[in-house]
Amino acid sequence: MDGLDDEVNARSGIGMTSERTKMRMIEQLRKDGITDERVLGAMAELPRHAFVEEGIASRAYEDTPLPIGHGQTISSPFIVALMTQLLLENRTPAKVLEIGTGCGYQTAVLARLVKEVYTLERIAPLMDKARGHLRDLRFYNVRFKHADGHAGYAVGGPYEGILSAASASHIPPALKEQLAVGGRLVLPVGTDDQWLYVIDRTEKGFTEIKREAVRFVPLVPGLG
Ligand code: SAH
């Protein structure tokens, strides 16, 4: 991964400063309550700056969302870390479905930690760019689908984990249906007032926990 990181650094012209700022980002995540070493390790390895445009690459390790084009944003490092930590809490899902590929950074974090990732994106050019980023980093365990996340992706399911990076007005029933027993769904719900939900599927049904107030782009119906 190091050689790869250097290659990407050379291409984006960021050089070694990115390594230091990346480690500062990891320290900040620890202070903010991220404790899962698997998540911290994956984020320490991945070149987040390679997922955004060169003009803003120097800001890639700040704890802030950044524009990725088409009116969308890459989620802040804390949100990516928190959602991944929740998805992996006391478990290692083998197969995960991600809704809202965006630039592919969250996808890469997941692909580092689980065996198989399916990721859905409604805006084709964003998906193509994300596919390129993951190819550059030599991830071969991700399947990209140009699809509306409201319907999930039944063909690939059931999933031990489902994560959405866009906020639905209600919990899409298809996502609950495609969750394996013992699986977990982590997603923001709401329009103006958004909350992060953690939904577990048990033998008996579903349990639902409303975690914390968040701010995501909306889950938009149909293809872009
Ligand atoms: N994890 C991404 C976050 C991107 S923002 C990243 O780190 O870059 C959320 C993404 O969800 C956007 O790319 C947006 O186009 C996508 N999206 C919104 N509604 C969607 C839907 N119905 N189906 C699939 N993707 C959707």
Image (cartoon, rainbow, N blue to C red):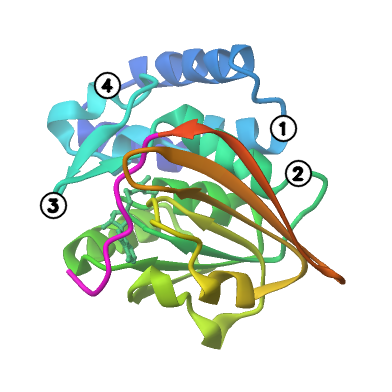
**Amino acid marked by disc 2:** Glu
Position in image of residue 126 (x %, y %) = 22, 59
Left of 203 or right of it: where is 154?
A: left
Question: Which quadrant of the figure has residue 26?
Answer: top right
Q: Which residues are magenta?
A: 215-224
Residue 22 sits inside the magenta stretch: no
Tell whether label 4 touches label 1 (CB within 8 Å): no
> Who's the residue at 30% across and 46% down the image?
217
Q: Residues within 10 Å of mark 4 (few under 14, many from 20)?
A: some
The disc label shown at residue 89, or none: 2
Position in image of residue 154 (x %, y %) = 53, 84
Position in image of residue 87 (x %, y %) = 66, 49
Q: Residues within 10 Å of mark 1 (few under 14, many from 20)?
A: some
Disc 3: residue Cβ within 8 A of ligand 1's nearest atom: yes
Q: Residues within 10 Å of mark 2 (few under 14, many from 20)?
A: few
What is the distance, in whole Å, between disc 4 and disc 2 at their CAs?
Answer: 29 Å
* Residue under numbered circle 4: 59
Asked whether residue 178 appears in the rendered view, the answer is no
* Residue under numbered circle 3: 70
Secondary element at image label 2:
loop
Question: Which quadrant of the render holds ligand 1?
Answer: bottom left
Tell whether label 2 touches label 1 (CB within 8 Å): yes
Between circles 3 and 4, the one closer to the viewer is 3
* Residue under numbered circle 1: 36
Vertical position of residue 69 compared to residue 168: above or below: above
**Amino acid marked by disc 1:** Asp
